[in-house]
């Protein structure tokens, strides 16, 4: 499992290995120099290393020295006085100077074949401004490959927020462990191709991790030949108010095609048809009946915020099985503290799937505040509502009530279209109905959702213009590829 560590945790690991030989800075520089050489290939163009005033700059001096030793033409741009560098960085600069390295105070031109960003590392907690912001702007305008050391300068390693301005790297060599900010919010748009280098250290397991199939692989089982639909649960979807029946249909269709034995659909729109002509296998019933018919229930896709919707949600909070709440079910929950208390008292598993605006309503803050620290926001919702939560978005964050969290990296920007969240709800619901534990069902559903989109893009469908309904069959195909054969 790939552990994700905060900048504070990384500093703790570094402190415990401060007496290593070779030292951490030398190891980091060597790892990054190998990446740089792979990027350069046989090209003979000059390399610019932009070194900052801290230890990230020291890493840059090591990279420069090793590239020079490999026969590359290297220039270091460093506007900091060597006398004020941290001790390890000062040693790295002395070694660069002793090797005959060339250091300049500033850089111009666009003749570089590679720029190594060693300006700021994980410790940056203030906005980048002044000459450093100008420096980042020039790096971003170079038009050549850019290799960031540890994190792109200007990017918050913990949150993925841009601190004023940030380098847009084509490659990032991250050291010791991945940082959450590389994988969520603005991180993926700035880090480019990401590589991890543990520097030969035994990295401790943290509270966070990269969402990988290994997390739920134990539940990927081939079905017995002597199977019947009753073995795979009854999934119920309540939603679909007037003008929004499509949302509930998407969720129900996704639940059926991910293997739920039966799918019941309760539409609030009294004028809705009595069956789904595109998917006649769905069983349409009065919404109030689904609490008795379902082994797992999803409430919210196209639900609306009417009095009828409120009644359905209130009743669902007493449902004895796994319950997934999405969309307007979350908005109603946010507006009624009494129902929040009922949610916390539930004994069965609860799954919440908010996007940032819904999360903000639940947490009684602004969307910007939610996005400012997506991991903390997801963890707070999970703790407050005693539920498994996914905060959707770039680098969706999954969190449990016990404080564990992970970040999903599957998917692409083509998923930013209407109905995608409804399909996700249906995928997770199907796994809940089939008896998967809530945490595993949510992890598998979120990861599968993104992998299905990637599968379609690989086949030439999207990413731009991808529709939610197209994702359902792709998710089925991807999921079947995951299952072992007997």
Image: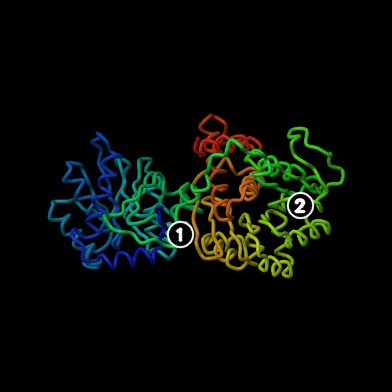
Q: Distance between the residues labelled 2 and 1?
A: 33 Å
Residue at image x 38%, y 65%?
A: 9
Which circle's residue, 2 or 1, is located before the other in the chain?
A: 1
Of helix, strand and loop, which one carries label 1? strand
Compared to residue 90, the image places residue 411 above or below, namely: above
Q: Looking at the picture, how far across and down is residue 291, in whole percent?
A: 76, 54
Q: Looking at the picture, how far across and down is residue 486, in whole percent?
A: 50, 35
The residue tagged 1 is 208
Q: Please rate how many residues cluster around mark 1, counting C-alpha atoms within 10 Å: few if below 14, some from 14 to 19, many from 20.
A: many
When asked about the image quadrant of residue 468, the answer is top right
Q: Looking at the picture, how far across and down is residue 227, in whole percent?
A: 63, 38
Which one is in front, 207 or 137?
207
Say left or right for 96 vs 149: left
Q: Please rate how many residues cluster around mark 2, counting C-alpha atoms within 10 Å: few if below 14, some from 14 to 19, many from 20.
A: many
When asked about the image quadrant of residue 419, the answer is top right
Which one is in front, 423 or 483?
483
The residue furthest top is: 460
When asked about the image quadrant of residue 91, the answer is bottom left
The residue tagged 2 is 303
Which one is in front, 175 or 289?
289
Colour option used: rainbow
Of helix, strand and loop, which one carries label 2? loop
Q: Looking at the picture, how far across and down is residue 54, in whole percent?
A: 30, 63
Residue at image x 42%, y 60%?
A: 128
Residue at image x 83%, y 47%?
A: 269
The residue furthest front is: 226
């Amino acid at each position: 499992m790939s552990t994700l560590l905060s900048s504070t945790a990384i500093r703790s690991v570094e402190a415990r290995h401060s007496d290593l030989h070779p030292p951490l800075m030398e190891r980091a520089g060597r790892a990054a120099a190998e990446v740089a050489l792979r990027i350069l290939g046989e090209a003979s163009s000059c390399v610019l290393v932009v070194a900052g005033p801290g230890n990230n700059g020291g890493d840059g001096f090591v990279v420069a020295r090793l590239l020079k030793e490999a026969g590359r033409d290297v220039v270091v741009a460093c506007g900091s006085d060597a006398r004020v560098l941290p001790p390890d960085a000062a040693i790295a600069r002395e070694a660069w100077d002793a090797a005959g390295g060339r250091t300049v105070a500033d850089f111009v031109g666009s003749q570089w074949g590679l720029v190594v960003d060693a300006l700021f590392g994980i410790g940056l907690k203030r906005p980048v401004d002044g000459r450093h912001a100008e420096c980042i702007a020039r790096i971003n305008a170079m038009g050549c490959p850019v290799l960031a050391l540890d994190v792109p300068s200007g990017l918050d390693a913990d949150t993925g927020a841009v601190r004023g301005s940030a380098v847009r790297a084509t490659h990032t060599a991250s050291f010791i462990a991945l940082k959450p900010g590389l994988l969520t919010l603005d991180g993926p748009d700035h880090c480019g191709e990401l590589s991890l280098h543990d520097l030969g250290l035994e990295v401790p397991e943290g509270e966070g991790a990269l969402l990988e199939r290994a997390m739920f692989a134990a539940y990927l089982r081939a079905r017995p030949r002597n199977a019947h639909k009753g073995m795979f649960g009854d999934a119920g979807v309540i939603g679909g108010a007037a003008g929004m029946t499509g949302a509930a249909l998407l969720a129900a269709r996704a639940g059926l095609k991910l293997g739920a034995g039966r799918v019941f659909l309760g539409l609030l729109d009294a004028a809705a048809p009595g069956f789904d002509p595109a998917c006649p296998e769905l069983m349409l019933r009065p919404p109030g009946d689904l609490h008795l018919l379902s082994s797992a229930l999803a409430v919210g896709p196209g639900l609306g915020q009417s009095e009828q919707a409120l009644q359905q949600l209130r009743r669902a909070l007493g449902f004895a099985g796994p319950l997934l709440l999405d969309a307007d079910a979350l908005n109603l929950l946010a507006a009624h503290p009494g129902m929040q208390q009922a949610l916390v008292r539930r004994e069965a598993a609860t799954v919440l799937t908010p996007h940032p605006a819904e999360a903000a309503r639940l947490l009684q803050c602004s969307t910007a505040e939610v996005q400012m620290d997506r991991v903390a926001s997801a963890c707070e919702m999970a703790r407050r509502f005693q539920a498994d939560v996914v905060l959707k978005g770039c680098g969706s964050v999954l969190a449990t009530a016990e404080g564990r969290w992970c970040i999903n990296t599957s998917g692409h920007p083509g998923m930013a279209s209407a109905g995608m969240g409804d399909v996700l709800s249906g995928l997770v619901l199907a796994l809940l109905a089939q008896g998967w534990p809530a945490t595993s069902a949510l992890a598998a559903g979120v990861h599968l959702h993104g992998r299905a989109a990637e599968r379609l893009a690989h086949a030439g469908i999207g990413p731009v213009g991808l529709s939610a309904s197209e994702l359902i069959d792709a998710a089925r195909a991807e999921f079947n590829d995951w299952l072992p054969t007997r």
